[in-house]
Amino acid sequence: MSDPDLKTRLDHLIRPQQVHRDVYTSPEIYRLEMKHLFPNCWVYIGHDSQTPNKGDYITAQIGDQPLIMVRHNDDEIHVLYNRCPHKGTKIVIDRAGNTGKFFRCPYHAWSFKTNGCLLAIPLKKGYENTGLEDTEAAHGMAPVGAMKNYRGFVFARLAPEGIGFDEFFGDSLSSLDNMVDRSPVGRLNVAGAPLRFMHNCNWKMLVENQTDTCHPMVAHESSAGTAVKIWEEMDKPEGTPTPPAMEIIAPFMSPYEFFENMGIRTWPNGHGHTGVHHSIHSDYSAVPGYVEAMNEAYGPERAQQILGENRHNTVYFPNIMIKGPIQQLRNFIALGPDKTLVESWIFRLEGAPEELTARTAMYNRMINAPTSMVGHDDLEMYERAQEGLMADGLEWVNIQRLYEEDEDFTKEAVLNGTTERQMRNQFDAWKRFMLGGAA
């Protein structure tokens, strides 16, 4: 499909107030996303605390492209395609490991420095006078088009040319800044392996749901609602403190007015967050010693600014969400038009009480685990939607709530917390980056 044909096709799929079901169901659209969308965006690879030592690596992917993030012998992070330039064999298949001073292909033993440069070829004399030096293979493992380590969070853009990191994210980086600044020493570390499980639905359903504030009190009534009812009906002494588990799950049953007043902020290029004024994370109990450590590190005024910012879900287009107050990142990895692998990572705040990490882990288990109650409410809705969109009675998906004429997604906006503007913002970015990213 040529570029003019692609633009025409996308124009037929995206309208200001609705999108065609094909964006969720079509194998052709999925293939076009792999070819165009993901390569043109800055996509999260991993956190540099996952590769603390020289030679440490993790495997990742952008779209359908297999990648390696590795720490070189100069302590710099590199992101390389996970492919030998000889026969195309994947260099590593483990999710993480340490390769020592070099990578060695398991097929023919070509070896490469950890920055990707070709190191050695067995029986290299067999390539004399063949012109090997003029081929791509002579340069070793290919790097991605561009990469950036932002405060420990490593992003990459596959396309060799395109939008810069700062332009792509703009002021949305304030959410990442807030999450990192919650450490008294300004540093996060990945805490353990992620919770990881498959969702039989399109990846965009998960991204949209992160700023859908009209579903919690409905979809989660069977889980959070039941938990709240049991707690309220328990025979307990007056003044019994609310346990941490209830502090986590009860806010999911907040009324519509809570979410309306919470607010939503959208930024250009598909980024946005719920929880402008308050959020479901605003009223957690204080952890002894934490505020004191923050006051000492930043001064009382700055510490209060950091801790007073309780953003709910920040979506970084195309496919991650972070929760700053609870130090969590969710990665929505598209594996097919109706298949998404979800990874839910948590982080430890260096210099902060371990009780905070314990609460973060509890939140992850209760809300995002394969065995969780709340997460499976959402999964049920995604899979029902994926099946329902195959019905031929209707072809369009409505994203019209609080729509305003001539919405300008090139500018930041703060609106009613139940608006679907962020979904419209994401599809505006989706269409532009499918076409290369130009405004």
Image (cartoon, rainbow, N blue to C red):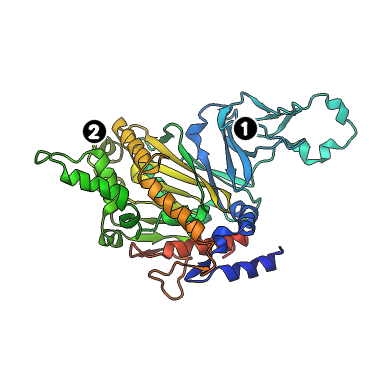
- Say above or below: 73 vs 360: above
Q: Which mark is residue 371?
A: none
As rendered, which of 388 and 270 lies closer to the eye? 388
Direction from residue 218 to residue 335 in the image, left or right: right
Q: Position of residue 241 (x, y in %)?
A: 16, 39
Q: Is residue 24 visible?
A: yes
Name the quadrant of the N terminus. bottom right
* Residue 289 disc label: 2
Residue 103 horizontal/vertical position (percent): 66, 28
Q: Quadrant of the C terminus?
A: bottom right
Dot 2 amino acid type: Gly
Mark 2, secondary structure of its residue: loop
The circle on residue 93 is 1
Quarter-wise, where is residue 329 in the image? top left
Q: Nearer the viewer, mark 1 or mark 2?
A: 1
The correct choice, above or below, for 184 with respect to 73 in the image is below
Q: Element type at marker 1? A: loop
Rendering coords of residue 360 (x, y %): 34, 38
Give the crowd class for mark 1: few <14, some 14-19, many >=20 residues within 10 Å: few
Please, what is the three-letter code of the amino acid marked with disc 1? Ile
- The alpha-carbon separation of the residues under discs 1 and 2 comes to 43 Å
